[in-house]
Each structure stands twice: as structure tokens, then as C-alpha cells.
Amino acid sequence: MSDEQLRPAWSEQFTVDALQELTAYGPIAQITPEWAWGGSTGLGIRVAVVDSGLEYDHPALEGCVRGGVGVDFDPVAEDGVRYVEENQPQDMFGHGTACAGIIHSLAPQAELYSVRVLGKKATGRAAQFAGGLRWSVEQGMQVINLSLSTAKEEYYALFHQLADEAYFSNLLLVSAVNNIPTPSYPSLYSSVVSVAAHEGHDPFTYYYNPNPPVEFGAPGIDVEVAWKDKQYLVSTGNSFAAPHISGIAALIRAKHPELTPFQIKTVLWACASNMQRMVD
Amino acid sequence: MDTNEPTADPLYEQLLRLVQAIEATRKAVLPRSDQELLQSIVDAAARIFGAAAASISLVDEQGQMLEFRVAYGAGNKELVGMRIPIDKGIAGYVALTGQPIAISDVRKDPRFNQDFAKSTGYVPGSILATPLLFEERVIGVMEVLDKISAPSFGLQDMELLGIFARQAALAIHHSQQTQGLSEALVRGLKELALADKSEALAELFSRLAEEQRDQGQTDDLLALAGLIHDISALGEAERKACLDILAVFREYRQRRQRYF
């Protein structure tokens, strides 16, 4: 069996050989990275990191964590979860801190919020997940970074509803696709910005894939990331691609607060590194 | 077999042959036990990914602990049987999120429980860990450690291990299922043989025995399932056994077709 056959489509599309050059024409071709985020620091943009928690005092985050919530599974509670406010959040594993560190490195003045959706048991995760999304929508977050996903079919409708709710609430949901070829929700919905890893390392180099469901490719291979207990390590996964796009989205939102999620996706498309802009 | 049963009965002889055929088929298709199956999977994983070590841990019924069931390479004896909470360590992260992760420079990784690693006498330099998923549920975690030819595992290793792990998870589930069902089937058939010695039944058994002999390993199980279906009307336990076998196999084949 050849390697080609074994590679799932969504990361294959961002390999050097498979990458497609795209062209933008007319007024839309006038959208450039400089226009989109040049000079922006993400000032005041509220970004929720739905993950394993955030280590609020990790040096890589430079005090940008403003608070957060722990979403714990509780079968007798409404919606099956309990919310515990965490003003000085911690990280169970380090994965959320890793994502937050990437966002902060791109958008240093964005405000980060920890939404911890993992607990001590394997059960109830999808309910925690949904609870975390709901909390983020209710708290008026402007960007949600979701580097986790679920393959559970039974949650297809719930996540679809939450993704739409986020979209209609003017909240941009950036979601990593799973690294293994299995359906992953909510990354496969059109209302979210779905991201897989490409092989490059420049944080602002990202690609658009004209053959979705996975639309964007950003760095995710051998990325040096912040980790639990004020440490750093080198890791690989689509998980680390999504926060690159979240960071850029925060920059765009700070500079162009009038743009809706749909328009931000268009701006991201127009500014992709594989886009040739043909201005008359 | 129960020695109280009448050994001279020709139907009994046929039944005995049938049971032996079932046993032979199971052994031919799958290793003798879960443990052997798991061991062959980690051995294969270590070879395919050029890893110095590999392990499989399974999630316990409460979903709170991971138990290391088999390991290959350094520290393997110490590792097997160890249990870790699911909210700790790299395997725990993968089990909770269902997401694979590759880490190099793992000594800096606090998720990697250093004390635990030291207690096995083996601290790896690079790790690739992927979930064992069955029907969207994480049943365990497969880890390969220390890629021999490179400082870290790449994205392609991650994708390959993901595909390998999916097959492994199906095999593990299938093996557990088959083992349980095979025992139920043998019990059911014994009862059946004692209750009804009609010619039709004898013919069924002989046909079954014949098919067992003539067909290939995997087809044998499918043929067996089809024939068991014919006798499923005879009892609830048998019927359920047949349905379960068919369902497992159908899924197994469908998934294979979908991805290969």
C-alpha cells in the first residue's frame, strides 16, 4: 500500500505537491494581509480556548488570561454539566496552554479565556464539550479556538446547532480536524473555520483548500509550544494549526470589528498564502 | 465437552466435530487469546514504525483508569499490569480526547509522568500516541516510543498509526466478541443436540462441518454465521449469538472496504 493511499485527504491537501494555487479577481483581490491585519495586536478581542484548561501564569502567556470556567460532567445537572468559574485557571495536561501560547504569540493583546472541558473520566466528554461552547457563546466571546473534536454521531445535531448559534451570535469558531481519518465534529460544518496542519513553520503562512470540508492549513508539525508547569516542548498535531488561524482571526477582528464570521472567512481566503490577487 | 453425554451417538460425534471446527477456525483467524492478539499488534506496530518500544493500554469499565496490557521493548515487563488515572500522562490525554499526539523532547513534557516512566526503567525521547477507537468510543491507547531512524515521529507516522490503530481496535473488539460468542454457541449447540435429534438437524451439522473444511479462514466464519442464522429460530440465546456475529462481521468488512 502506498503512502498516498494512507494519507487522509485533509492533510494531504496541504502537502507541497498537492497544494493548489488560487486566484482572486476584482475588488476581492484588493484584500491583502496588510489591509486585513497589518498593525493589529488583537487588542481587546475575547478569545476562548476550549481545551484542557489554561495555565494562567505561564510565562509564554504574559498575563493575557482573563479568567475562565471548568465544565464538569454531572448527569443530574441541566444539560448534564456543571460550570465552575476559574479566575486563575490551571491546565490538566498542557494542551490548552500550548494552543493559548500560539494565539498569544500572534495576537499579543487579545484576552484569553480558559474553557476546560476535560475531567477525570472518559464519559460525558461530549456534554462537557457542548457546555463549553454554550458558555463561550453566552459570555460573548469573539473567537473560540477548538482544538478538540468528537466523532460521536449522536452529537452531530447538537454540535451543529451550537456551531450555528455561535455563527449567528457573531462568534467565529475555529476548529481543528482530528489527525485520524474519522468524522470530527464540529470541524466539518460550514459555519466553522476548519484547520489542518501543513508542513511549514512561518506562523503567518497558511493555505486555503478549495476542496473542503477542511478549508485551511496552518503550521502544526514540530511546533515548539508552551506546556503545563511553565515548560515548553515540541509537538505535532492539527491541534496546533487551529490556534494559528484563531490568532490571525483575532487580529482581523480587532482591526475590522464590523466583519461577521462569514466575512472573516472570506478575508482569510483572500489572504491565504496560496492566493494570487489579480487587481485590474 | 461434558463427559456425561452419550459418546456413541452419531449426532454427538458430528456435534463434537463441529465444535472442534469452530475452535480451529477461531484459532486460525485470531490468536488464541486477547493477550496474544494484543502482543502481536504491538510487536507489529514497533516494527512498522521503527520504534524501540510500543505499548497498548485499555480503558477500564469505569472510564477512570488506563491499564497497560502489553508492551514491546525496554521496560516492557515492568509496564504490563500498571494502571494510571485517565487524567494523567500522555496516554491519558489521548484516551480523554480521542486525539493522537506526537511529542519529541518528551523529557520536558510534564504530562509524561516521569516517576511512572522511571519506575519502568525506561524514559523515552519521542512518543507517538493514538487512540484505539471502536464505534466512536476510545477503548484504549496505542503508543510507539523512540523512532529509531529520526528524532521524532512525523505527521505521516501519526496518520499511519491512526489507520493501524483502527484495525487493531476492530481486531481487539472482534476477538473479545468472538471468544464470548463461541462459548455461548458451543453451549447452545450442546443443548440443541440433546433436545432434538431430527434428521434435518443432523444434515445441518454435516453440511456445516463440510463447509468448515472447504472454505478459507475468514469465509468460514461468515458461512458459519449464515448457517447459525438458520438455527437461530430454535432459541433466544442462539439467535442473539447469530445476530451479534453477523453484526460484528458486517461492520468489520464495511470498515475495511471503506478505508482500503
Image (cartoon, rainbow, N blue to C red):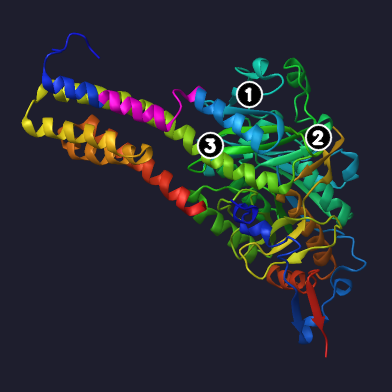
Disc 3 chain ID: B
| Outermost residue to the right | A39
Residue at image position (14%, 23%) is: B193
- Which of the two discs, 2 and 1, sits closer to the camera? 1
User: What x and y, as percent, mark residue B224?
Assistant: 27, 37
According to the picture, the residue beneath numbered tag 3 turns out to be B168
Main SS class of the magenta portion in the image: helix
Q: Is residue A96 magenta?
A: no
Horizontal side of A22 relative to B199 (left or right) equals right
Kindly report the distance in space between the C-alpha atoms of the residues bearing marks 3 and 1. Answer: 15 Å
Closer to us: A214 or A94? A214
User: What x and y, as percent, mark residue A122?
Assistant: 57, 34
Find residue B144 and report its image quarter: top right
User: What x and y, as percent, mark residue A11?
Assistant: 68, 57
Kindly report the distance in space between the C-alpha atoms of the residues bearing marks 2 and 1. Answer: 27 Å
Labels 2 and 1 positioned on one and the same chain: no
Q: Which residues are magenta?
A: B19-35
Q: Are marks 2 and 3 in contact (CB under 8 Å)?
A: no
Labels 2 and 3 positioned on one and the same chain: no
Please give the label number shown on residue B5.
Answer: none
Disc 2 chain ID: A
Q: Amino acid at mark 1?
A: Ala
Residue at image position (68%, 44%) is: B158
User: What x and y, as percent, mark residue A167?
Assistant: 64, 64
Q: Amino acid at mark 2?
A: Lys
According to the picture, the residue beneath numbered tag 2 turns out to be A228
According to the picture, the residue beneath numbered tag 1 turns out to be B71
- Which of the two discs, 2 and 3, sits closer to the camera? 3
| Outermost residue to the left | B198
Disc 1 chain ID: B
